[in-house]
Image: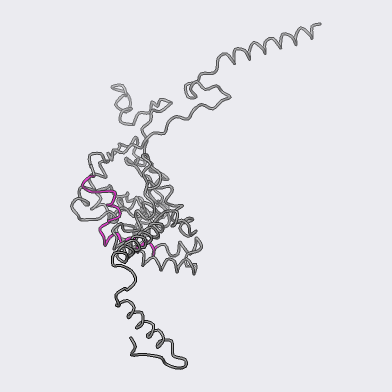
């Protein structure tokens, strides 16, 4: 603790920070002489609950459609396009919101995606898609990211709702049931291979496999 | 005196005519029971015919109708969802009928490598069908039926 002690005069920032860190470490490893062990444990527990709960609440707050459409880039482009599709308006009134498809539900994957999304904050601040024209220019690149993500996780976000086990092909149209039996159940293809552009408009599809 | 009598008669006739008009309510088969000056309730929308079974054409030049739902199919400068199944290269996987070779021709009759731009917008000719009962009956018969109907010994 006292190896680096009273120096006279000004010190560099790094030296001062190092001294502070050493002193802090000294305080942390010394047993408490004021609070009982029970108080410390309990306080730690309560603080933990508050911090963790607060963290998750904040995380969930960024996982709402209201948050997503808070930026005009999302509200005026992709959200406006979603509204006419079956994932927004349909006979039963069940609908998908932005994070249902675009944020993994699994915690670690979700955190990874949220860290990636910090680039989107950058994009918003510097206006990389702040007009409709700029958005359309970037649409292919943005779509390719999402298609690659769906392809890599075997369309996990689709399957969170549309499970192959629960899919009754006899209730589907003949065309759909044949295609699902041949390609989905056999594992030959995953949802995104055929179902592109179901929730938003398509980018230029020239050269995309399965498109002309 | 004569003038006055005439105008009275005219008034009477008009009154009688309008009375019968109002009483009738004009129950036309197409309009339903809604009076002429009111708009009746819209008939319920019907679902698409989604059998995926090929429908026979009524005459050889008829563009085949689409026997499946095409809700949300995007056909524009960005892409053509129909061609994801009906393009030549896609029919192996999709087992859908290939777009006719005539669709590869430009207006000078030259064959292009893929669907000609003037044939790109499928729904200009090909349309899906809904399950409806037509309000007006149709006595159209196709050419085969008509020829078979011809009296024996008649001109064929």
Q: Main secondary structure of the magenta part?
A: helix
Q: Nearer the viewer, residue A188 or A204?
A: A188
Magenta-colored span: A140-166
Q: Nearer the viewer, residue A192 or B137?
A: A192
| A165 drawn magenta | yes
The x and y percentages for residue A53 are 36, 59
Is A201 within the magenta? no
Q: Check the image and report above or below for A142 versus A185.
A: below
Position of the C terminus of chain A by quadrant: bottom left
In the displayed structure image, the side of residue B20 where residue A130 appears, left or right: left
Which image quadrant for residue A175? top left
Quarter of the image with the N terminus of chain A in it: bottom left
The percent position of residue B17, horizontal first and vertical second, equals: 63, 13
User: What residue occupies the far right of the structure in this picture?
Assistant: B1
Report how many numbered discs are placed on residues in the image. Answer: 0
Residue B51 in sight: yes
How far across and how far down the image is residue A104, in percent? 31, 58
């Amino acid at each position: 603790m006292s190896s680096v002690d009273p120096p006279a005069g000004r010190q560099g920032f790094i030296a001062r920070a190092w001294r502070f860190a050493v002193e802090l470490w000294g305080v942390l490893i010394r047993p408490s002489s004021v609070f009982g062990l029970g108080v410390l444990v309990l306080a730690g527990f309560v603080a933990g609950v508050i911090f963790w709960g607060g963290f998750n609440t904040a995380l969930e707050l960024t996982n709402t459609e209201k948050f997503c459409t808070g930026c005009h880039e999302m509200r005026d482009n992709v959200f406006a396009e979603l509204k006419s599709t079956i994932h927004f308006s349909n006979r039963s009134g069940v609908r998908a919101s932005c994070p249902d498809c675009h944020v993994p539900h699994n915690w670690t994957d979700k955190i990874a995606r949220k860290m990636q999304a910090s680039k989107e904050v950058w994009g918003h601040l510097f206006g990389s898609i702040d007009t409709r024209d700029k958005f359309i220019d970037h649409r292919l690149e943005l779509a390719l990211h999402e298609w690659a993500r769906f392809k890599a996780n075997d369309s996990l976000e689709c399957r969170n709702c549309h499970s192959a086990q629960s899919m009754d092909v006899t209730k589907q149209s003949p065309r759909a049931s044949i295609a699902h039996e041949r390609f989905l159940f056999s594992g030959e293809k995953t949802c995104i291979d055929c179902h592109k552009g179901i929730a938003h408009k398509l980018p230029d599809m020239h050269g995309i496999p399965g498109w002309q | 005196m004569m003038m006055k009598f005439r105008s009275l008669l005219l008034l009477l006739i008009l009154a009688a005519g309008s009375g019968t008009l109002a009483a009738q309510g004009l129950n036309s088969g197409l309009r339903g029971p809604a009076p002429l000056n009111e708009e009746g309730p819209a008939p319920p929308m019907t679902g698409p015919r989604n059998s995926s079974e090929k429908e026979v054409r009524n005459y050889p030049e008829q563009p085949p109708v689409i026997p499946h739902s095409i809700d949300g199919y995007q056909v524009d400068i960005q892409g053509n969802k129909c061609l994801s199944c009906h393009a030549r290269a896609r029919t192996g996987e999709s087992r859908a009928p290939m777009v006719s070779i005539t669709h590869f021709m430009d207006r000078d009759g030259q064959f292009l490598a893929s669907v000609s731009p003037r044939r790109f917008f499928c729904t200009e000719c090909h349309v899906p069908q809904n399950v409806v009962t037509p309000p007006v009956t149709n006595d159209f018969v196709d050419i085969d039926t008509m020829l078979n109907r011809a009296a024996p010994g008649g001109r064929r």
